[in-house]
Image (cartoon, helix red, strand yellow):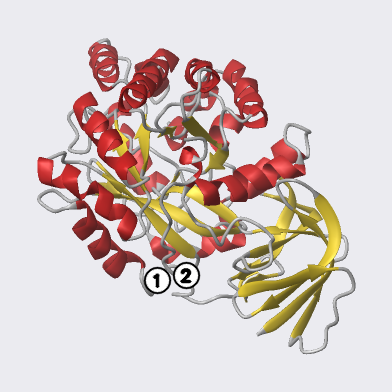
Amino acid sequence: MKILIKNGTVLTAESEYIADVLVDGERIAAIGMNLSDTGAERVIDAAGKYVMPGGIDQHVHYSFVYKGSKVRGFETTDACAVGGTTTVVEFVNQVKGKGLLESLEEYKRTDAEGIAMVDYAFHPVMTDARPEVVEEIPKLAEAGYPTMKLFMAYKGQFFHADDEAILKALIKGKEAGITVMVHAENGDMVDYLTKKLISEGKTGAYYHAASRPPIVEGEATSRAIYLAELAEAPIYIVHVTCKDAIKAIKEAQQRGVPVYGETCAHYLLFDESVLDLPDEEGAKFVCSPALRTRDHQQPLWDALNNGWLNAISSDHCGFDWEYQKHLGMGEGCSFADIPNGAPSVQNRMNAIWTYGVCTGKLSKQKFVEVMSTNPAKNNGLTSKGSITVGYDADIVIFDPDYRGIMGVDSCLEGVDYSIYEGMEQKGRPETVLLRGKVIVENGKYTGSKGDGHFVPGKSFGKAYEHL
């Protein structure tokens, strides 16, 4: 199908300009002024609106289980589309007793194919560093999985990784251009502080932040970077939250270490005071790493603008409040029992546009860069993340004049609360195309279950660009 988008202001990571965009089938066929609508089966007038690449959320969880609680799955990815995100990259834990590829292919077949409503890719999470599993790492690149992750946090959980496992992954991964990602928190520090606080009767949600203060993240970030230096390999730090970690990343980059990082929308917009809300409402905001004091927020915005961090993700975890998060605060429980993570994929772009672009903290170009273009490059998604001829026609027509209120009533995330409840929204994705198919019109989802396809990534992504 040919679709002509006329008179819109095209936004890229470098510029903005008024132009028409012609979509032919799944790809962008032409960009220019006064393109003829001859042969177009549909013409969309985008005058007064922005035409930008579909968002890429490189950090989502549709299979995460925390102490028996499981998040909502790919059946809720219509929420991504309505929020302007057309591609997600999901973390998939290696199943105990199985290999990395076996775990991934089984999950893809049973939980994503024919279900996802936006395109998707995967980060395998190595949970068992047996020699045969480490030797399997280069095969990930051949199968279209150019990234992998290890958890430095969560001591005692099956997915916790020690330094040796990370070092082995870095060394083996660089052979095939695999970008190794880490969740950087010192698991021993967190374990000690958690036990100490609980023994002192400090069990409320607020103490989640006290159990994993910035030093926990700063130490682990520095250690991960040193491991990467020893391996002479790039490394990517996920969900950076604090000045301590930013400092470690900045200083490493300045001495030539290929270290990259992302932050998440909630770290830019919320501080730890929300953990102390009455009636155990603070449990809604329990995530790891923890929310910080407000003085860490501006350094995060600065890090994005200076390139020390290169993406904003959601770290979406679709847990319910009533049956999962709230129950974690029941009798005999503590902050350590609250499922970690929050639903946030639908309003990632809306919130950052409203409180980042509209407040002058980010330019429109930087918005496109950290929401779409860099995540595509980080993950080897070479046909996505840009309004460019030949690229996938993943396009958001964004109405900057829209005004609304964010909240659970307008969310499609399949859960019973929103961390953005009651917050003002300026602008919205009005029309969204996924590979040339219109899946959102007038802000409403109009696509179909199974519209999303697996997108294999190419190895040697952005983290290798200076090597």
**Residue 227, visible in the rendered structure:** yes
| Residue closest to the far front | 467
Describe residue 126's horizontal placement relative to residue 280 as left or right.
left
Residue 452 numbered tag: 2
- Which residue is at the front of the view, 266 or 263? 263
What residue appears at the point 76 percent right and 86 percent down from the top-left corner?
40
Query: Mark 1, residues whose alpha carbon is within 10 Å: few (<14), some, or many (≥20)?
Result: many
Query: Mark 2, residues whose alpha carbon is within 10 Å: few (<14), some, or many (≥20)?
Result: many
What residue appears at the point 33 percent right and 27 percent down from the top-left corner?
335
Residue 39 numbered tag: none
Distance between the alpha carbons at the discs numbered 1 and 2: 8 Å
Q: Secondary structure at mark 1?
A: loop
- Are circles 1 and 2 on residues that touch, CB within 8 Å? yes
- Which residue is at the front of the view, 127 or 111? 127
Q: Quadrant of residue 206?
A: top left
Query: Which residue type does callout 1 highlight?
Result: Ile
Q: Horizontal and vertical percent for residue 6?
A: 83, 71
Pick the quarter of the image with the N terminus. Answer: bottom right
Q: Quadrant of residue 49?
A: bottom right
Foreground mark, 1 or 2, reads: 2
Q: Quadrant of residue 446?
A: bottom right
Query: Which residue type does callout 2 highlight?
Result: Gly
Q: Horizontal and vertical percent for residue 162?
A: 21, 27
- Which residue is at the front of the view, 340 or 29? 29
Q: Horizontal and vertical percent for residue 165?
A: 21, 32
Describe residue 315's horizontal placement relative to residue 410 as left or right.
left
Residue hosting label 1:
115
Choose the circle earlier in sequence order: 1 or 2.
1
Q: Secondary structure at mark 2?
A: loop
What residue appears at the point 25 percent right and 11 percent down from the top-left corner?
196
- Which residue is at the front of the view, 432 or 58? 58
